[in-house]
Amino acid sequence: MMGIFGLGCSQQTPKVLKKSFSKQALVQKLEDEDGKMVTIQQILDQHKGKVLVIDFWAGWCRDCLNALPKARELEEKNKNIDFVFLSLDRSKEGFERSLEKFEMKDKENYWFSSGWKNDFNNYIDLNWIPRYMVIDQKSAIAKYYAITPEDPEIQATIDQLLK
């Protein structure tokens, strides 16, 4: 029996660490908590001029839940930057339940209603969650691949961008 991610997917650093998003990736739609569809581009535009950390997670993901306290610490330590949470929960109900259960309602949350396999996730080589990306003030990718909020490169990248 294959694992949850199917054949060939594992926690492996992508060979190419991308610095920008493709046009297809930017038009990928997600749902906000109210069920309104938004694109990755719209999310990035809302945060232009700020450093942004994108946190990919799901309520069913044990590694994600174990990382939540450290992710919250990262947020607390960096009140001057923005955080967005992209959920890979399998259903709208699961997404809503996870936000409630794990006290995420006060954060900026979106859900991939299209599921795991979509133009954005395929483009960024999403093969594992949790996953963290740091986006610079011009919406370029500053830190492409981190799988723990404790990755020292996340904080180093944030500090570098705020200089």
Image (cartoon, helix red, strand yellow):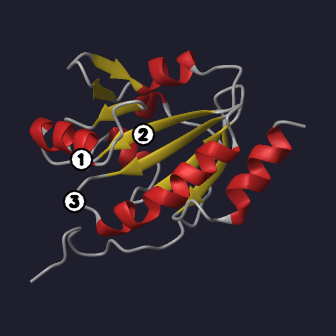
Q: Sort mark 2 into few (<14), some (14-19) or many (20+) by Cα contacts within 10 Å.
A: some
Residue 139's spot in the image, x, y percent?
A: 64, 28
SS of the residue under disc 1 = helix
Q: Which mark is residue 59?
A: none
Q: Say which of 23 and 131 sits in front.
A: 131
For label 3, the residue is 60
For label 2, the residue is 85
SS of the residue under disc 3 = loop
Q: How many marks?
A: 3
Horizontal side of 107 relative to 52 (left or right) equals left
Q: Quadrant of the N terminus?
A: bottom left
Q: Sort mark 1 into few (<14), some (14-19) or many (20+) by Cα contacts within 10 Å.
A: few
**Amino acid at pointer 3:** Trp
Q: Foreground mark, 3 or 1?
A: 1
Mark 2 or mark 3, earlier in chain: 3
**Amino acid at pointer 1:** Lys
Disc 2/disc 3 C-alpha distance (Å): 15 Å
**Amino acid at pointer 2:** Phe
Residue 81 seen from this side? yes
Q: Foreground mark, 1 or 2?
A: 1
Residue at screen point 29% across, 52% down:
58
Residue at screen point 41% across, 49% down:
56
Instruction: Using the image, determine if residue 14 lies above or below residue 71.
Output: below
Horizontal side of 92 relative to 126 (left or right) equals left
Q: Sort mark 3 into few (<14), some (14-19) or many (20+) by Cα contacts within 10 Å.
A: some
Residue 11's spot in the image, x, y percent?
A: 43, 73
Residue 160's spot in the image, x, y percent?
A: 85, 45
For label 1, the residue is 101
Disc 1/disc 2 C-alpha distance (Å): 15 Å
Q: Quadrant of the C terminus?
A: top right
Q: Residue furthest toward the bottom?
A: 1
